[in-house]
Structure formats: structure tokens, C-alpha cells
Image (cartoon, helix red, strand yellow):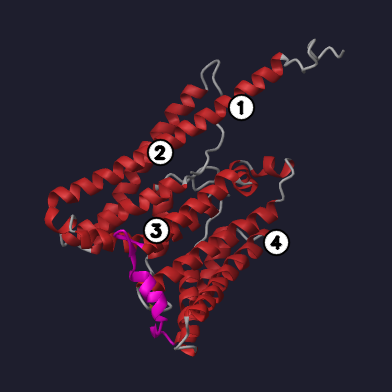
Amino acid sequence: MSPTESTTGNPIKTPGKVNDEVDSRTRSLVAHLQMERGTLRMLVLTVAAFLLFAILNPNVFLDPLNIVNMAVAAPEIGLLAIAVMVTMLTGGIDLSVVAIANATGIALVTLSAHFPHAGGAMTGLIVIISFLVGLLGGVANGLLISRVGITPILATLGTMQLFNGLAIVYTGGKTLYGVPSQLTTLGEATLVGVPLLFLAFVLAAAAVAVVLNRTSLGLKLFLQGSNEKAARYSGIRLTRTLMATYALSGALAALAGVMIVARNPTASADYGSSYVLLVIVIAILGGTNPSGGFGTVTGVVLATLTLQIVQTGFNIMRLSNYEYAIAQGVILIVTLVVDQISRRRQANRQTRPGRLSKPRPGIAQ
């Protein structure tokens, strides 16, 4: 019998192994607590914003039509913000998500114009081909970043300019019209009073959360974002991880492009020109660490709803877009300050004798 085995044949845990196991479990518990606190804080902010405008103008804000309008407008922004969040998890960023969404929409409207009497099957094929256009945009970003080695912010800035320029040249700066009636009907449809676009957004967000939480790709994203060198030494192929990350970002942006056309049956090169900064604000507001290694899908969804509520409330109160921009900045800064204070307190507790030195990176949910 080996000295490391018990009389029953089971291996005996040495003090070192026991300490490592306790350390690992404690780190995991700390990470989940951080995640839950951030999500809870975002939920409180969402509810507070809703109650504020419900009190200020209940007749208009609580009107069922207004609630439906908010639910229809939020999905495209939410998907773009999740796309940015996914790339931030690896320590990168994708500035081209809006350009990819517009390219998808332009491809969809163009193909629809060539087949004006397309049936259900043909409409589905048009949507799939247009979706692949956006996916290819994400793959192009992945190649530039993972294979060529260009910094993500510069690579996606370049592709953003490229995609926007090609779209302007192709459309001549004009708005394109002509979308299959099946798609516009889908954009207007509801299920038990809930818009189908919003339900599709929730399903897409849930699918991304599953990928990040339950697959090896999700674990690799977090490991690469928290410590790239350690991820490389652990055998993770960083190029493949980055390729998958930006392909997923492109797919989400393409899905947002399809939703944009379904909601508003037109396409143009300059649609959502202010969305780039907005989706970055939402991703960070939702608790995503811009340096990588931590982020939650739930937080991004709640941040999307919060800013949509604030925008709608400001419109009802007849406040300008400039005042809405100020509100965005205030909400973001206050959230970041609170988060930073919380992180410092947590770090101080972890550095005390007998405590862990650093918690494990968070997990998306």
C-alpha cells in the first residue's frame, strides 16, 4: 500500500492539497459573491429608474403601448452591447459592431429587392445569407487580431471605417427600402403581449450566457482575459479563442442587424451612428471589466433596460438628447465609483493575514 493511500485504497489528501482545494473553493465563492452583488446593484438601478418615471408621469410612462415600444427598441442595442461585452472578456473590444449590423441590414434589403415576391422559405434564405455577411465581418476582425496580431481597438476601428465606407459607396448615402412582409410582420408580432423581438433578445442572451458558463470556450475567454500568459502556459490556443470570440461578436451584431430591419424596414450606412459609444457604456455599466476576465450577460441586459427606460422617460419629460447624454455619463460614473470602492474594500479584506490575495475572475451569467 502506498503511503499516500488510506487502508480503503483511497488517496490521502495531504495538507497542501487540502489547502489548495479550500483556496480554489473560496476563490470561486468570492467570485460568485462579486457577481451577485453587481447584478443586484444593476437590478436595483433598473427598478429605481422605472419607478422614478412611473411616478413622474404615470399616465404616459405606464401606458401599455409605451411599455411595448421600449421592449421593441431595446433588443438591437442589447445584442450589440453583449457583442462588445464578449470581446471585452478577453481584454479586447469591438468597435465595428454597428457597422456589421448595418452591413447585414443592407445585404438583407438588397437581396429582398431582387426577390420582391419571396415566400417564407426564400425569406428565410435571404435572412441566413445576410446573417452570414455579418458573421464574415466578425471573422475578418478575428483574423486581424489573432493571426496578424493587430491590437483589437485598432483592428476594429479600421474595419469599422472600412465597412462604413463600403456601405456608403454601395448605397450612395441613400436609405434603401424593400423588406419581405414576413419579416416586418415578425417585427410587429407579440406573444401574450410581449414583442417577439424582445423574446428573441432574451433567448439570444440566454444562449450567450450558456456558452460563457457551460462550455470550454467560455472558460477560455475568462482565463485569457484575466491572465493571458497563464492561459498560454495552460495549453489554451489563444488564436482559436480570439477567432471564436470575434466570430461570436460578429454573429450577435448580424442578429442585431436583422432585428433592426424587422423593426424598421429600411437600411442605411449611417444608422445608429451614436450606438458605438452607447453600447460600450452599457457593457461597462453592466459590470464588464474593460481589462478582461469579468462580466455578466445579466448585468448587460439590465443595463440595456435601464438606459432604455431613462431614454424613454426623458422623451416623455421632453428633455433633450444632450440631457440624456449627461444622464448616461452620470449613471456610468456613479456606478464605476461605487464598483471601484467595493473592489478596494474587497482587496483590503483579501490581503489581510489568513485571507486570499486575489479572487478568481468572475463568471458570466
Q: Residue furthest right?
A: 1
Q: Is residue 319 visible?
A: no
- Dot 2 crowding, Cα within 10 Å, few <14, some 14–19, many 20+: many
For the residue marked with disc 1, what is the amino acid? Ser
- Horizontally, residue 208 falls left or right of residue 239, namely left
**Viewer-side residue, 283 vs 119:** 119
Q: Position of residue 338 (x, y in %)?
A: 35, 37
Query: Could you tell me which residue is drawn at 70 percent across and 17 percent down?
Result: 16
Residue holding disc 4: 147
Q: Secondary structure at mark 1?
A: helix
Residue holding disc 1: 24
Q: Secondary structure at mark 4?
A: helix
Q: Which of pointers 4 and 1 lies earlier in the amino acid sequence?
A: 1
In space, the residues marked 3 and 2 are separated at their CA atoms by: 24 Å
In space, the residues marked 4 and 3 are separated at their CA atoms by: 36 Å
Mark 1 vs mark 3, foreground winner is 3
Mark 4 vs mark 1, foreground winner is 1
